[in-house]
Amino acid sequence: MTQKNKDLQSGLLTKNHLGQISETDQQQQTDYLEVIRSFARLTYESVYVIDYSDMSFEYVSENPLFLCGYPAREVMEMGYEFYFRNVPEKDLELLNTINEAGFNFFEKLPTEEKKHYSITYDFHLVNSDGRKVLINHKLTPLFLTGEGKMWKAMCIVSLSHHQEPGNVYIHKQGSDEILKLDTESRLWIKSGKPKLTKREIEILQLHAQGLTINQIAEKIFVAPDTVKYYRRRIFERLGVNTIVEALSYAVNSKII
């Protein structure tokens, strides 16, 4: 190791090394919302917390996508009333189906596994100017009751890469298995996470950096037509039609 690397290592390990933490400071761990606020500052996505004890919102971030033109504080005060005001009736019916099927599935899980699961789906929000936006909504448990029921949940909202609402999936942490909801039968259908080759992942990552097809071809020493071939394979594997949809799908599914 060079002296420069030794100095860098020393600085990284000692600059903010605090040592023992006082009991008073350790009590801050009970205020979990500070962690969520920190996360919300780092992401472009909207973040909020549902408290199912009274169907309220315990926290709503200031990221604008979920707010529909309201201040975050006002959305938090609305709680579930926010959905009734800003989700079209047809999508509210969809949310009711997802809610019933999702909680029926959740209740059958072993309590010790429940926090490993998350659900994702798409629906429209209507902004104050009447404009509809299709959003992707992810939800995962934060706290359970002693009986294993979901008490609080954390939700993440981003733009959907689909064209229509629905697209309801359940994911289990650490597993490639995906469950998709058939909204007609209300049955969960097992499938596997799409798998991409190392080269396909590399091409997606380079697109994410803003490189064009020609720039990617030059960087990985292939012809532009070869990059186009890999793109077509990516689209087929992910079931999408554009590179924007492919990137969104890959990020949301933790493929890249």
Image: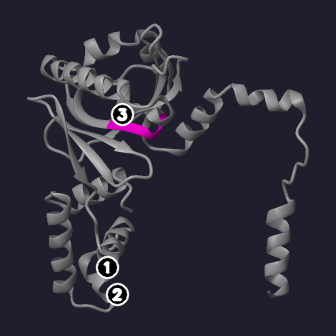
Residue 188 percent coordinates (x, y): 20, 36
**In this view, the mark in front (2 or 3):** 2
Q: Amino acid at mark 2?
A: Ile
Quadrant in the picture for the N terminus: bottom right
Q: Is residue 215 visible to us here? A: yes
Q: Is residue 136 visible to us here? A: no
Which residue in the protein does label 1 denote? 199
Give the image quarter of residue 83. Answer: top left
Tell me what residue is drawn at x 48 percent, y 29 percent.
111
Q: Which residues are magenta?
A: 115-119
Which residue in the protein does label 2 denote? 220
Most prominent secondary structure in the magenta stretch?
A: strand
Label whose residue precedes the other's in the sequence (1 or 2): 1
Quadrant in the picture for the C terminus: bottom left
Tell me what residue is drawn at x 24 percent, y 59 percent.
246
Residue 166 percent coordinates (x, y): 18, 35
Q: Residues within 10 Å of mark 1 (few under 14, many from 20)?
A: few
**Relative to 241, is 101 above or below?**
above
SS assignment at label 1: helix
Q: Amino acid at mark 1?
A: Arg
